[in-house]
Image (spheres, rainbow, N blue to C red):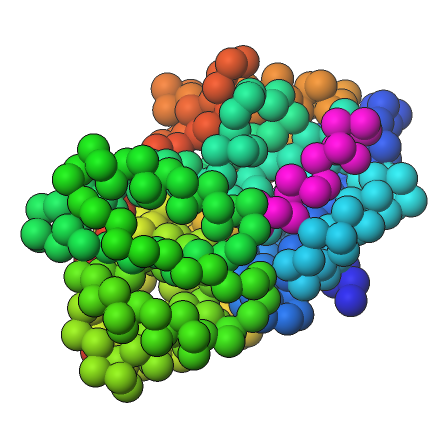
């Protein structure tokens, strides 16, 4: 499935030079995205895309970027690394996009890295906090979210503070899940927690019966889930039905809104770390901006992943402005590296890049699902 989001970002009265790069013409900038828009992780891809699109539409209403439209060409990968590789090759070599934006998932981005390196094409705001995408430093990738290591430490400190010291891990059997399982085992020792066991599930599966049975025998205080919303919801539902009274904790990539929608009151108390502010209360200017932008869309509601997409699109547009009319990939990279809280108003969400550090944010928070699927924090 191909979703072409032609968001017209037209600036009045600017003079545009001849394009110096693929994906740049006198009238448009073409960006490429590979993410799940169908399949068991589809809502994650769609939420991020909708948040980004709402900002592009807002920029369009105000005139745009140096006389050029921004066209986001989005390809569906169903959260399948092989499809992501094929999509990336198509975006780079056939569609000739200028830059990549908003890819979703760790195994998918890892699979696409060789093509990105070969083309020298930057990727802005992958929806992943994996260390394998941050270390060693990759000049082509810019991260708008905090790392999973930061989420892990934040979560384990909270569990330590509430005396929940016996944890089990339900993880996706791929690069992401194994990386986070190893990190949890290591960091649990620092906080005096014990990992009493772990169970894997294959990517894109929600077959949880065997896992639930094993966790019931382990009797952990908390099950930490390193999976998306479908298997997470399935495990919670099955274990609650079996009488489990302990807790469930999830990482930000789970898809908070999608998880809560499936659990309803059965999800009360389920914890989720977040890497963007609370999207339903306008405590910060960036959230107020996002809420106003989403109010213009009849197809979407405010949620954490949508806000992440909005923030990502906002900082990308700022960098495209800074790069100037003579747009190049190298110019975009330098423009992104110039963004700091001292010269960029993030609306209360600080972003800081440099020539040696492309991890823009260290913001982490903890939320829980309340009654009727509402979030509290």
Kindly give the residue lying farthest to the right in the view shown.
94
Residue 24: quadrant of the picture: top right
Magenta residues, dominant SS class: helix
Q: Residue at x 18, y 45 (%)?
A: 193
Residue 241 drawn at (x, y percent):
28, 86
- How many discs mark residues in the rendered view? 0
Residue 203: quadrant of the picture: bottom right
Q: In this view, does 78 lie above or below 320?
A: below
**Left or right of 101 on screen, residue 226:** left
Residue interval drawn in magenta = 105-119
Q: Which residue is drawn at 35% across and 76% down?
A: 213
Q: In this view, does 33 lie above or below 324?
A: below
The magenta stretch spans residue 118: yes
Q: Nearer the viewer, residue 120 or 250?
A: 250
Q: Nearer the viewer, residue 224 or 141?
A: 224
**Left or right of 93 on screen, residue 355:** left
Residue 210 drawn at (x, y percent):
43, 75
Residue 138 drawn at (x, y percent):
60, 23
Q: Which of 137 and 123 is in front in this view?
A: 137
Q: Which residue is drawn at 64% across and 71% down?
A: 39
The magenta stretch spans residue 272: no
Does residue 54 appear in this view? no
Q: In which quarter of the image is the C terminus?
A: bottom left
Q: Quadrant of the N terminus?
A: bottom right
């Amino acid at each position: 499935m191909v979703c072409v989001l032609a968001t017209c970002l037209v600036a009045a009265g600017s003079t545009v030079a001849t394009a110096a790069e693929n994906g740049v013409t006198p009238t448009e900038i073409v960006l490429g995205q590979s993410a799940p828009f169908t399949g068991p992780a589809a809502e994650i891809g769609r939420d991020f895309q909708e948040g980004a699109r709402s900002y592009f539409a807002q920029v369009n209403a105000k005139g745009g970027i140096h006389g050029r439209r921004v066209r986001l060409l989005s390809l569906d990968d169903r959260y399948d690394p092989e499809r992501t590789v094929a999509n990336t090759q198509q975006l780079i070599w056939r569609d000739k996009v200028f830059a990549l934006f908003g890819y979703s998932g760790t195994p998918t981005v890892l699979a696409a890295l060789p093509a990105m390196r070969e083309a020298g094409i930057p990727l802005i705001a992958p929806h992943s906090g994996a260390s394998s995408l941050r270390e060693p430093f990759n000049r082509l990738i810019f991260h708008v979210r905090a790392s999973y290591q930061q989420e892990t430490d934040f979560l384990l400190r909270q569990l330590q503070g509430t005396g929940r010291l016996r944890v089990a891990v339900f993880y996706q059997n791929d690069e992401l899940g194994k990386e986070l399982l190893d990190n949890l085992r290591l960091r649990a020792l620092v906080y005096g927690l014990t990992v009493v066991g772990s169970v894997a599930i294959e990517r894109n599966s929600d077959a949880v019966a065997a896992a639930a049975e094993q966790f019931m025998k382990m009797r952990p205080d908390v099950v930490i889930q390193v999976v998306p919303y479908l298997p997470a919801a399935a495990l919670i539902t099955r274990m609650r039905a079996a009488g489990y009274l302990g807790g469930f904790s999830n990482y930000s990539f789970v898809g908070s809104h999608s998880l809560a929608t499936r659990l309803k009151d059965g999800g009360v108390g389920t914890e989720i770390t977040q890497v963007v502010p609370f999207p339903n209360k306008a405590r910060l200017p960036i959230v107020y901006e996002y809420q106003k932008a989403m109010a213009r869309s009849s197809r979407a509601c405010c949620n954490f992943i949508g806000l992440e997409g909005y923030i990502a699109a906002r900082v990308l547009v700022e960098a495209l402005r800074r790069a100037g009319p003579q747009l190049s990939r190298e110019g975009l990279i330098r423009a992104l590296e110039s963004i700091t809280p001292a010269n960029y108003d993030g609306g209360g969400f600080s972003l800081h890049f440099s020539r040696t550090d492309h991890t823009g944010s260290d913001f982490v928070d903890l939320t829980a699902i309340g009654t009727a699927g509402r979030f509290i924090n």
